[in-house]
Every structure is written in C-alpha cells, then in structure tokens.
Amino acid sequence: MSKIANSKLTLLAIVAVAAVAMVTVYMKGHLDGREGKSSGLIGESIAAESPPKVSPVKTRARDFYAPNSEDLGPDEMRLIACGTGMPTARPKQAASCWLLELGNGDKFVFDVGTGSAERIAAMQIPYNYLDKVFLSHLHTDHFGDLDALFVGGALAGRQKPLRVWGPKGDTPERGTKYALDHLFKALTWDLDGRAGITDPRGYQPFEVTEFDYKGVNKIIYQENGVTIRSIPAIHSLDGPVSFIVEWNGLKFVFGGDTYPNKWYAKYAKGADLAIHECFVTVPDMITKFQFTPQSALAVGTQIHTAPEAFGKMMSLVKPRMAVAYHFFKDFDTTGPINDRIRTTYDGPLSLAEDYMVWNITKDDIRVRMAIYDEDVWPPPATEKPQLPDPSLRIPYSKFIVGGKYDMKDVIQPTYDEINKKYGTNEKQD
Ligand SMILES: [Zn+2]
Ligand SMILES: [Zn+2]
C-alpha cells in the first residue's frame, strides 16, 4: 500500500474514532462498547461552556493510542486486545489474544489465537519482552498463532526460550505439554533449516509449565511482584481455565471460554478489569453462521456464555470495567448483544474489538482504540545477537546443489558492498 493511501486510511481511522467518541458523549450509550473515561478533546469540547484553547502549531490531546508513543506509568497497567473473535479468523478480528503490560516492565500474553501474531507485531514491543504466554485452553482460537509468535518472535529478537503456562488435561494427551511438544516436533523442518544461520537462543523448545486445571485460585506464577492464579472453566471438555493477575494493588481477570461458573463469580469479584467471553446471540448464529437451532442453542448457551448470562455474571463480579469478547463485532451484531447484556447488567462495559486499549490505574480506566502502522517492521532486539555456529548447518544433498544456476557474478557486488561497509570477509557458498 502506498504511503499516501496508508495515511488516508489512518486519517479515516482517526475520524472514525472521533465519531465514536462523539456518539459516546451524546448518547451516554453503550453501542460502541467503550464507556471508560472519555478524555479526548471532542468530549471535553462538548462538555465545556467555552470553547477549548486550540493552536495552529501546538499538538492537542489524542483520543487514540499510538504504539511506542507513550510511557507506561509505574503504577499503571495497559491491556491491548490483539484478538477478540472466533475460530474462523477474519480481517477485522483475530481470535483470542490479550497483551497485558505492567508498569514494572513485565508483559504477559494471554492466549495467542489464530491471526493474533500480526496484532502483537503492530504494538512494536521488542520480542525479548514477549516471552511469557498463558493459555486458557487448547482450542486453536486460543493458541493457533503460538507457532507464529514462537518462530517469528525468535527471528525478530527474542533471544530466550518462549515460556508457556497452560493446564494439564484429564489425560496427558489432552494437556498443554503434549500439545506443545508435538507442535515443536511439527516444526522440525522449519527449525532444522535455521540451524547455523541465525541466533539459536529463541528456537529452543518451549518451556512449558503445566498446572492442574482443577486448581481453585491456586498460584501458578509468582515473580517480580506479580501473582497469577488459575480457576477452572467449563467448556467443551475438562481442562480449560481462567486467570487472575494481581500486581501493585490492581486485579486483572482473563476469562477463557466457559459456561458461566461459580469459580469466576467468586474469585473475579472486585476486579479492576474483568474479561469474560460473551458469545454471538443464538438468532445470529442461526441466520449468519447457518447453525441449526439445536446446535446454536447448545454452542451459544451451553458450551459458551450467552450475552444475558455474561451480564448476570458481571452483576455478581462488579468489576470496575467488564470486557466482553468472542463474538464477531459488526454494526448489526453489536446492538443485539448489548441489548441482551443490558437486561442483566448495568455497570461499566466494553464490547471488545481488536486494537482496543485500556489504561488502568487505581483512579482511572481509560478506553481507546490503537491506531497502528501497517508498514511496521520488527522493533530492535534488546541484546546483541549471538553468532550461530555454522558447523550446525545441515547441508543440501549433492542433487539439490547440482541444480544451482550460476549467479555468482551478479551476487558478488553485494558481498563486496557489505564486506566493505561492515569490515567483514564473507564469501559465497
Ligand atoms: Zn474454546
Ligand atoms: Zn474460543
């Protein structure tokens, strides 16, 4: 995409965000799903009696989040929705993925569903910081992009193994360790081909920490002032869980897929921000997903959480901000989902979509959308790369080498250019 087209798109996105902010202010409504403090200029200008001061040369307050443009306060959490959708990823929504950043420098990825690695990349965070992943369960819409984060992250500067926490199954074969050991094996060709060519540290096997899915509010992680607990969930088979993060007096709850359960009702209580799944309405599953009425009812209300049930759960939990996800969020699905939630819940609510951002402190929860650069490249590595051991390289067979067309004369100038510029002495194979 050309830079001009891209900047036009960005401008359109900014206008769209501003329009949404105006709707929020005028209607005090819930349709846009963002009811955090509206601190943008437009909201203030409507509320103010006299017009705000503007300048032709000074910047004004923004009502969007531009990645890599804001410091995170020492007492602040930033949550970014990197996937809010369903197993069938689509351009507008990747599947479940939530990036939590803490003011102490820690970053956690909760779920890494299909399509979400691209959204993570848009946040421009050095991959060495993205080494901790927590999986709620092993449906692909919750871990389908783990391979992309694993290989792509290592290639772009994660110089350490990827650590993954996930539940055991009711049998070893249904547990996180089994799934990841086999995922690693499935990458044999990919990883063998990188041996001896790139920094090897990020390509080590996953460091998996499995825990009992029946653990009720048991600690599964405790480092650097951060405590993460798990509670069971009721979804599809035994095994799924939800996570509760406590840090610096703030409590964040990430609910994986579940039928409404008593553990969430009890242990999510009083969260500063509580995410819980909220499924597509049953009528929309029948008309838009072409489910039969029987399957729509079973999947939409028994395997998952129906919007009315989501509302009832949040009325029990009473978070400072409730976040609903796991539905295709469109102009014609948002209203019905909101209406059904509002039959059972009248507290603060975000109907999540990809690139929604929450800044959470003890005093404030600010909700915005991120405006990202489609042309983004990987951020710099945080440490110097380790040179690989060329002897580990696996050679081609004689047959394949014999098929090489002689390009040495046209490639040699590039070797000369690079050797001269960087003082190296590299030679063609
Ligand atoms: Zn699931
Ligand atoms: Zn799911």
Image (tube, rainbow, N blue to C red):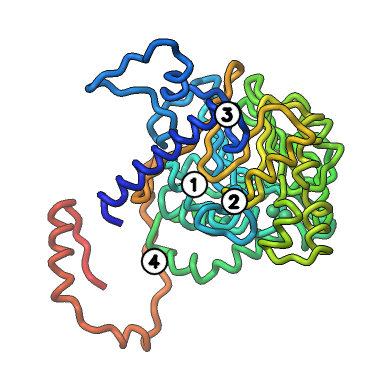
* 2 vs 4, front mark: 2
Q: Amino acid at mark 2?
A: Val
Mark drawn on residue 27:
3
Q: Nearer the viewer, residue 408 or 67?
A: 67
Structural crowding at the residue carrying mark 1, measured as other residues with C-alpha within 10 Å and reported as few (<14), some (14–19) or many (≥20)? many
CB-based contact (under 8 Å), mark 1 and mark 2: yes
Q: Which residue is mark 4?
A: 391
Q: Amino acid at mark 4?
A: Ser
**Alpha-carbon distance for marks 2 and 4?**
34 Å
Residue position marked by numbered label 2 in the rendering: 112
Pair 2/3: label in front: 3
- Secondary structure of the residue carrying numbered label 3: helix
Q: Residue at x 26, y 73 (%)?
A: 429
At label 1, the amino acid type is Ile
The CA span between labels 4 and 1 is: 34 Å
Mark 3 is surrounded, within 10 Å at the Cα level, by few (under 14), some (14 to 19) or many (20 or more) other residues, namely few
Q: Quadrant of ligand 1?
A: bottom right
Q: Amino acid at mark 3?
A: Met
Q: In which quadrant of the rendered view does residue 68 lie?
A: top left
Measure the alpha-carbon separation of dots 1 and 2.
9 Å
The alpha-carbon separation of the residues under discs 3 and 1 comes to 32 Å
Q: Under tag 1, what secondary structure?
A: helix
Residue drawn at x 60%, y 36% as measured from the top left: 33
Where in the figure is residue 3, as x and y percent of width and height? Answer: 26, 50
The residue that label 1 is drawn on is 120
Label 4–label 3 contact, CB within 8 A = no
How packed mark 2 is, by other alpha carbons closer than 10 Å (few <14, some 14-19, many 20 or more), is many
Pick whichever of labels 3 and 1 is earlier in the sequence: 3
